[in-house]
Amino acid sequence: MDSPAGNAYTVTMRDIVLNGSNNYGLVQGENSSDFCNVTFRFESAVYTGPKLAAHPYGALEIVKSTIDIGLSGSEELAAVNRIVLDGETTIRHNPASGHRLFYLQGEAATQSITVKAGADVKVTTGDAFFASDDSSQMDVTIQDGALLSIN
């Protein structure tokens, strides 16, 4: 995908069942700030496998989906710059030792995790919720009426 800086693109996978096997991510974005406006969106998706997304400068949105990360050697669910969680979403993460659920990368000033208003997100993880290249500037936002359960 050609994404000159400044142009926003969203790639949506909707109403789909996916079984992944690539430890580098089912979807991958370029490791360049030119791709900071590209978002991978999974809506009403069911995913089982290792890492879902690797997109160091872009965003990952998970909406009304069920995600199971836990195949042998699995790492984080995503290595991205921004995470958005929405709708009724369930995430189960059983990683190889030492891998966080979300690994935030890329431009430190834009690293963020957002749970949208009204979302009901249930997370079970065998490790920490997130790690960051530079957590000193990261935003975590849980909007009005959102529920986030982390076990």
Image (cartoon, helix red, strand yellow):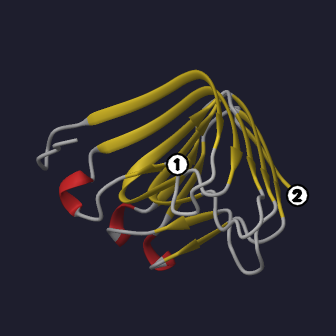
Specify the label residue 26 is tagged with: 1
Q: Label 1 is placed on what type of residue?
A: Leu
Query: In the image, is 117 to the left or to the right of 126?
Result: left
Residue 52 x, y percent position in the rendering: 58, 50
Few, some or many residues within 10 Å of mark 1 (<14, 14–19, 20+):
some
Secondary structure at numbered mark 2: loop
Pointers 2 and 1 in contact (C-beta within 8 Å): no
Position of 105 with respect to 4 (left or right) is: right
Say which of marks 2 and 1 sits in front: 1
Residue 32 rendering spot, x and y as whole percentages: 23, 63
Lateral position of residue 4 relative to residue 142, left or right: left
| Camera-side residue of 21 and 79 | 21
- Amino acid on which the number 2 mark rests in the picture: Asn
Can you say whether 82 is above or below 79 in the image? above
The residue positioned 29% from the left and 58% from the top of the image is 30
Residue highlighted by disc 2:
151
Q: How crowded is mark 2: few (under 14 residues within 10 Å), some or many (20 or more)?
A: few
- Quick check: 100 above or below 121? below
* Front position in the image: 51 or 44: 51
**Image point 17% across, 44% down: which residue?**
3
User: Distance from label 2 to label 1 (Cα)?
Assistant: 25 Å
Task: Give the answer, above or below, for where 134 lies relative to 59.
Answer: below
